[in-house]
Each structure stands twice: as C-alpha cells, then as structure tokens.
Image (spheres, rainbow, N blue to C red):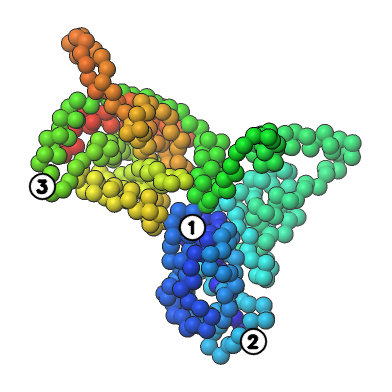
Amino acid sequence: MPTEILMPALSPTMEEGTLAKWLVKEGDEVASGDILAEIETDKATMEFEAVDEGVIGKILVEAGTDGVKVNTPIAVLLADGESADDIGATPAKAPEAKADAGAEAAPAGGSDKPAPASAPPAPRADGKRIFASPLARRIAADKGLDLSQITGSGPHGRIVKADVEGATAAPKAAASAAAAPAAAAPATAKAAIATGPTADQVARMYEGRDYEELALDGMRKTVAARLTEAKQTIPHFYLRREVTLDALMKFRADLNRQLEPRGVKLSVNDFIIKASAMALQAVPGCNAVWAGDRMLRLKPSDVAVAVAVEGGLFTPVLKDAHLKSLSALSAEMKDLATRARNKKLAPHEYVGGSMAISNLGMFGIENFDAVINPPHGSILAVGAGIRKPVVDKDGAVTVATVMSMTLSVDHRVIDGALGAEFLKEVVAYLENPVTMLA
C-alpha cells in the first residue's frame, strides 16, 4: 500500500511550515537519507530527508505553499511493485518514527497538531489510561470536560487541542437549565481575559484610521506564544546589581592588543558570557531548569544568548561555556549570531541551556527586565556601561563606568538568596576579570 510522506516537525516549536522547494519530482527513485525538499520552519530553512526507499508517486503539496501543518501529507511514496494506480487506495501512514517525531515535538512548543484526516483512527485508551496532550488536558480541566467522552484525532487516537476546544461540558445532574447561562458567563470572561480582543474587535477600534495590516510569520507567532506562556505560567522575580567596568575595560583593551595579530577582538558581552558560565559552576543550584513536575540540574554551563533577527529573535546556546577560552567563546558567538541572522541554525544549536543573556547595552538601554525563555531558570538583562559619579571604598566621590544588570528568576527553580549569590559571583568575575583566566 502506498505510504504518505508527512510534513515533519523540524524544530521543537514548529507547528506549520512553508514547503519552499521540492528537490525531487514524481517518478523519481529515492533512498533513505536522500534530500526530498527544503522546508522553512519558524526558525530556519532546513532540508527534509527520506526515511524509506521507493518512488515518488505523487506530490500533494506544491512548492511555495505556506502554512502547511505538521503531519499533513505532502507526497506519496510507492514501494517496489506499486504503481500510481494504487494511490487511489487509502495510503498507509508514514513510518511511525517520523510521525511520532512530529507528535512528540508538540508539547515542547506548547502546541498540538491533529493527525492527517486520512489516517485511520486508532485506540485512544489502554485500560483506564486516556491518551491526551498536556495542553488538551489543561483546556479540558478549565472547561470541565470529561476526557473519556471525547474522541481523539491525534496520532494513535491521542486527544489534542482541537478536540477539546470545540467540545462542551455535559451539564451536571443537579444543575438546572436556568443556571447554565449564568455558569457559562465566568468562563467566557476568563477566556476573554486570557486571549484578549479578537482581530475584528481590534480592527473596529481603528475604523477610519490609516494603517497597514501585517500578517504574522512563523517566527513571530512562536515568539508571541512563548512569551505569553512565560509571563502567564512562570513566577518571575527580579534581582538587580550594578557592576563597575573600569578594570574590565582596561583588561579587555590589553587583551585585544595582544590578540589583534590573530584577528580576535573580544567584546564586553564575551566577558559576560564567561562570567555567567563560571558563576553557574560556583552556584550550581542556579544551573537548573523547570521540567513540569521536577527540576533538572545541569552539570555543564550551557549559556544561551539572545540575538535579534528580522521579525524576532534566536537564543543560540554556547555549550560548555565554562571550559572555553574568551577567544573561543568570542569566535563561536560571532558564528552563531551570523547564522542566526541568516536563519541557518540547526535546532540543536538553539535548544537547551539553563539560563540566557539579553544585552541591550549597545542600543543605549541602561536597564530593563527580560522575560524568561522556558524552560530556563533565569535570564540576565544587561544594560549599557554609563560614566557616573560613584563613592569608592575610601569614601571619596569619583567617576566610574557602571553597568546595570537585572536577573529575572523563575521562583519555582531558584530562590532569592540563591539568585543573589549567583549575581554576586557574576559581578565578582566582571570586576576582577583576570580571575576568568585562572
């Protein structure tokens, strides 16, 4: 029986993508590992490989098609002995490894993907266990739905977001018909608060005004969803410190003079990355992430750094940053930032890490509060170095270069005293930069 090739989930947050280019045509023979197409995800343009060998019997989605949902059939693969005449029959699903990859990627991005309509229904329960995504369970709980009464449309009959959004709770036996509208009102108000006004409602507010409507691309949709999730579900608190940079600036200038023949130029941000990585080793309790019903405490210092790109941002991760020299970190950061702006990063290069750094100092911002990127335990917001009067250790008023830092902390992962100890270590390394070379 012909096999459907499904739109893959090529990144943890991917819900849909653009089938940018087919690299095969109908009638072509393909083997496992052959590149079939180029797909634009919410983060990058990536190549899609064949899992099995066979012949491309039919292309179902044309090149250039935007908004193709994950797990949507995009082509049909014919096995040995099959022909295009067999495509009229219901195609078999793509190999489970590929289908499951898309299904498992969904929770990481906080979304659900319904299975293709042509996929045959599968059992959704094993004994008393009901298969449902975490998001579907949360929506069902908010709406008072009984999951055992809902038929799932996801892989293997899994109940997904779409199944519960349109469902309504059965009225309780003791409830009267007259009471139902009153009971529904709070839920409606809660939904309005959670989602805000609709697009039509907002457009009506600006009737008669001149404006341009901008469609959201995949990256902006993902950024919006992730930041909304972060502010709604993560109990943020904030710790602020100032650091005197004069010693670091002199040390950096001396190092850059020595490194100039090698074409290396260290930035202040390179020192902040290194200081944060070493502080995570000094305060291992802060080197942790939230994992739903537990915490994961990392041993290496994997530090993410926010990079602004057109339409959004990336947070590439510098792995084992505590073990790398300043020049190695500088070169790696420049490479990651360049490929991030060109949307050429692979998922493993921007997934992971226990904390992130967001530096807006180069834009003249003196201080700000950053939003934690889940599942990170914290994010360090870095402002500009400003010349200002300070009181030195002898009580004299002098002028120094001072930089403001704010650590946004997930209180589920890191308590106040622990976060303060981490920030103290970061400041100590930056004010005594030679210790980062020890």
Instruction: Tell me the kind of residue under disc 2.
Output: Asp
User: Which element carries disc 1, helix, strand or loop?
Assistant: loop
Residue that mark 2 sits on: 85
Q: Which residue is mark 1?
A: 41
Quadrant the N terminus occupies = bottom right
Inspect the image, locate mark 3, and give the three-letter code of the amino acid beneath it.
Pro
Q: Earlier in the sequence, mark 2 or mark 3?
A: 2
On the image, the x and y values in percent for residue 297 come to 38, 44
Q: Is residue 381 left or right of residue 25?
A: left
355 left or right of 134 in image: left
- Asked if residue 54 is positioned above or below residue 310 in the image, the reply reads below
Does label 1 or label 3 sit earlier along the sequence? 1
Marks 1/3: CA distance?
40 Å
Residue under pointer 3 = 261
Q: Is residue 254 above or below residue 69?
A: above
Secondary structure of the residue carrying numbered label 2 = helix
Where residue 362 sits in the image (x, y, percent)? Answer: 32, 34
Q: CA distance from mark 1 to mark 2?
A: 33 Å
Under mark 1, the amino acid is: Thr
On the picture, is 338 further left or further right than 220? Answer: left
